[in-house]
Amino acid sequence: MTADPMTPAEATERSDPRDTLSPETWLDEHGNALYRYALLRLRDPHKAEDAVQETLLAALAARQRFTGDASVRTWLTGILKHKVTDQFRRDLRDVELDDPDELTEGTEGDDGEDFESSGRWRERLAPWGDPVAAVERRERLEGLQHCIEALPERLANLYWLREVMEEDTTTICKDLAITPNNLWTLLHRARLSLRRCLDRLWVRNTSHTG
Amino acid sequence: MLTCKDASHLLSERQERPLGLRERCALRLHLWMCVSCRRFARQLGLLRRGMAALRQQLRGETRRAELSDEARARIRRALAEREGPPRTERL
C-alpha cells in the first residue's frame, strides 16, 4: 500500500464501513485495556495516559494501513508498545548509556558503597534467614516496591523493564541502544542497591515495616 | 583469584547470560570460601522471587485500573482536534 496524502476527513468518507475502523469507538472499547498495558510498564498514571493518547492519535493517522489481519486491539497494542519504548528512551535520553557511572552518578549506585578498594565486602553480609516463601508476603512486597522507587529513576526503569516486564536483555539493548555489558553493569548496580535497601528493612530494622 | 566484587558481578550476570566454564569454576571456588558471597547469591535468588511475586500482584491490581474521566475527555478532545470537523461529543 502506498502512502496516502488524503486528509483524515476524506479518509473517513472512503474508509471501510466496518465499525472497527471507526476511531470513535477505539477509546471506549480499548482505552482501558491500553491504559492497563501502559500503566504496568510505565508505573506512572500520567505517562500511561499520554501513551494511550499518542497511540490513538498515531492509529488515527495510520488508519489506512490497518489491514484487518489482526484485531483492532492487537493493532493498537502494537502501536502502544512502540510508544512505551519511546517513553523509556525519553526518560533515558539525557544520559550517556555508554557510561554507567553517569547513570548512577551521585546516587548509592556506586560499588564503593558495598566494597573496599581491595574488592572485599565492607561488611560481612547478614543472612536474610527467611524461608523462601517469606519474601512473597504482602508487606515484604511493599518493602520491595519501596526500595525500587528509591532507586535513581532511570535505574528503576531499567530494572523494572527487565524484572517485572521480563524483557530479555537483547530486546532492551536493541530498543535502548545500549551494550549488553553496560546493561549488565547497570542491572547489577540496581541489585546491589536493592539488596542494601532490603537489608535495612528486613534485617537491621526488625520492626513491622519490613 | 576472584574478589568479592568480581564474584558479585558474576552472580548478577548469571541471571542475564550463561557463564563460561572458567567463570563457573572460579565462582564456585570463591563461594566455597566466602560466606558473604554465598549469602549474596541466596539474596539475589530471593530478590528475583520477590520480583516475580510483585509482578503477579501488580498484574492483579492493574487489571482493575481505568482511565480517569479527565484523561478520557482530554484524549477525546485530542482525537477530535486531529480528526478535523467537530463531531458529537459523547460522555
Image (cartoon, coloured by chain):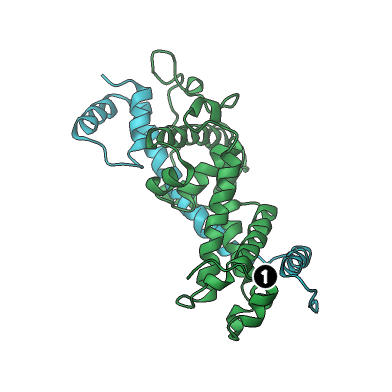
Chain colours: A green, B cyan
Using the image as rendered, state which of residue A16 and residue A149 is in the foreground: A16
* Above or below, B3 relative to B60: above
Residue B68 x %, y %: 74, 65
Residue A20, by quadrant, is bottom right
Pick the quarter of the image with the C terminus of chain A: top right
Outermost residue toward the top in this view:
A118
In this figure, which residue is indicated by the disc labeled 1? A7
* Above or below, A203 relative to A46: above
Q: Count every numbered label the image shows and give the total.
A: 1
Q: Chain of mark 1?
A: A
Using the image as rendered, state which of residue A104 and residue B50 is in the foreground: A104
Crowd rating for badge 1 (residues with CA inside 10 Å; few <14, some 14–19, many 20+): few
Question: Does residue A121 show up?
Answer: yes
Residue B70 x %, y %: 79, 64
* Above or below, B16 relative to A104: below
The residue lying at 43 percent from left, 27 percent from top is A125
Residue A197 x %, y %: 55, 34
Residue A209, by quadrant, is top right
Question: Does residue A143 show up?
Answer: no
* Above or below, A153 relative to A110: below
Residue A195 x %, y %: 49, 35
The residue lying at 57 percent from left, 69 percent from top is A4
Q: Is residue A4 left or right of residue A134?
A: right
Which SS class for mark 1? loop
Outermost residue toward the bottom in this view:
A17
Disc 1 marks which amino acid? Answer: Thr
The residue lying at 42 percent from left, 43 percent from top is A173
